Image (cartoon, rainbow, N blue to C red):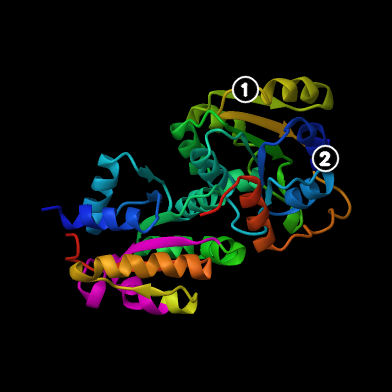
């Protein structure tokens, strides 16, 4: 039986996502390893740079996914505001939810406590999948980014992949 | 040479290459000098010109991509030099027009007089790096540069612009998205 991570990558590819970049987080180590195994992972150094690469990929005809920890969402606010949301560039954000329910290392508590509200402020639609809703949530994300020509986010809580 | 002088010396030699211009006066000058369907003008997201160009270059290895940035842009995100060099896209050329100041915000000095940006690109591992300071040097340097295998870096020393900048880029951001995608045959 395929792992949850492999099934997630299969679902992303089936939904039309075909360019994968970002900065790692331990909560998504398994899907990143799966993407690397398939030769489809372009690791970036900063989350806003990953968004820049994703923007370029979309301009050139790809449908991108950017993986990041929620700490990286802070780094990314200007890229989202003055690039993706301004130029109408679709992108799926796979954001790990460190600090979920206040249980994590201290550096994750503040951003973890406001993650959905931060995305709401930016009007970026989001879902937090469970293992058994991943397929449906990936399909929702693919439809949403295409229909809105803007980013949408999947929030990865502890336990979905690791 | 001012920024418009430098752009006027380079842009006519780029054919159908995709051009990515960083935000600020540089984009405005480039649009005024020579606009093309395959030109992308940033009006925000400072520091991301090279990542945007890299994404295009990786997705379309059959097309040449030329990134133009000022010194302030490169220094805001020098990690982009490292990432471009490590990815080593053969179809990416990178130009830095180094006038030593943040021209769009009042001419505040950058640190490019003490941190040579061409040396950063060389250390990162660009396949070729060249620095030119005069119009007489620039013409032959451009002739060689446009034929180079990427990632190639060209730093051009420029004077800070005096007087009013060019007109604002007339295209709405989503129009720029649509026309570049059209120029690249993007349909998905």
The residue that label 1 is drawn on is: B148
Residue B56 position in % (x across, y down)? 55, 43
Q: Which comes before the other along the chain, label 1 or label 2?
A: 2
Q: Secondary structure at mark 1?
A: loop
Residue drawn at 80 percent across, 33 percent down: B12
Q: Is residue B64 above or below residue A47?
A: above
Q: Can see residue B100?
A: yes
The residue that label 2 is drawn on is: B2
Give the magenta range.
A89-117
**Splitting the image into 4 quarters, where does residue B104 fall?**
bottom right
Name the subunit of mark 1. B
Camera-side residue of A32 and A2? A2
Q: Quadrant of the C terminus of chain A?
A: bottom left
Residue A122 position in % (x across, y down)? 50, 74
Instruction: Assess disc 2: are there few (<14), some (14-19) or many (≥20) residues with their C-alpha within 10 Å of its C-alpha.
Output: some
Residue A30 sits inside the magenta stretch: no
Camera-side residue of B28 and B178? B178
Name the subunit of mark 2. B
Of circles 1 and 2, the one toward us is 1
Residue drawn at 29 percent across, 58 percent down: A11
Camera-side residue of B130 and A56? A56
Instruction: Assess disc 1: are there few (<14), some (14-19) or many (≥20) residues with their C-alpha within 10 Å of its C-alpha.
Output: some
Distance from the alpha carbon under mark 1 to that under mark 2 = 24 Å
Q: Is residue A116 above or below residue B164?
A: below
Residue A115 position in % (x across, y down)? 36, 74
**Splitting the image into 4 quarters, where does residue B106 fall?**
bottom right
Residue drawn at 31 percent across, 52 percent down: A24
Circles 1 and 2 on the same subunit: yes
């Amino acid at each position: 039986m395929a792992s949850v991570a492999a099934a997630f990558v299969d679902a992303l590819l089936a939904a039309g996502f075909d360019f994968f970049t970002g900065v790692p987080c331990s909560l998504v180590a398994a899907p990143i390893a799966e993407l690397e195994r398939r030769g489809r992972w372009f690791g970036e150094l900063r989350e806003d740079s990953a968004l820049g690469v994703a923007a370029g990929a979309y301009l050139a005809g790809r449908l991108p996914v950017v993986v990041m920890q929620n700490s990286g969402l802070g780094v990314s606010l200007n890229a989202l505001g003055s690039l993706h949301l301004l130029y109408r560039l679709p992108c799926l954000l796979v954001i790990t939810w460190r600090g979920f329910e206040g249980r994590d290392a201290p550096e994750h508590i503040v951003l973890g406590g406001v993650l959905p509200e931060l995305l709401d402020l930016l009007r970026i639609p989001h879902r937090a999948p469970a293992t058994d809703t991943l397929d449906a949530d990936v399909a929702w994300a693919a439809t949403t980014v295409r229909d809105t020509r803007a980013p949408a986010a999947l929030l990865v809580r502890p336990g979905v992949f690791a | 040479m001012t920024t418009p002088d430098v752009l006027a010396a380079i842009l006519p030699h780029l054919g159908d290459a995709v051009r990515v211009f960083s935000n600020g006066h540089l984009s405005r000058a480039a649009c005024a000098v020579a606009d093309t369907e395959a030109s992308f003008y940033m009006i925000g997201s400072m520091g991301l010109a090279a990542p945007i160009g890299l994404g295009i270059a990786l997705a379309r290895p059959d097309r040449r991509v030329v990134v133009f940035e000022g010194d302030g842009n490169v220094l805001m995100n020098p990690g982009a030099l490292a990432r471009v060099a490590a990815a080593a896209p053969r179809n990416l050329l990178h130009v830095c027009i180094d006038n030593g100041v943040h021209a769009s915000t009042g001419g505040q000095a950058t640190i490019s007089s003490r941190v040579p940006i061409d040396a950063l690109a060389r250390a990162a591992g660009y396949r070729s790096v060249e620095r030119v300071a005069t119009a007489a040097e620039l013409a032959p340097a451009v002739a060689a540069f446009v034929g180079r295998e990427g990632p190639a870096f060209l730093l051009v020393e420029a004077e800070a612009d005096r007087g009013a900048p060019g007109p604002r880029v007339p295209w709405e951001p989503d129009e720029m998205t649509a026309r570049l995608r059209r120029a690249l045959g993007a349909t998905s």
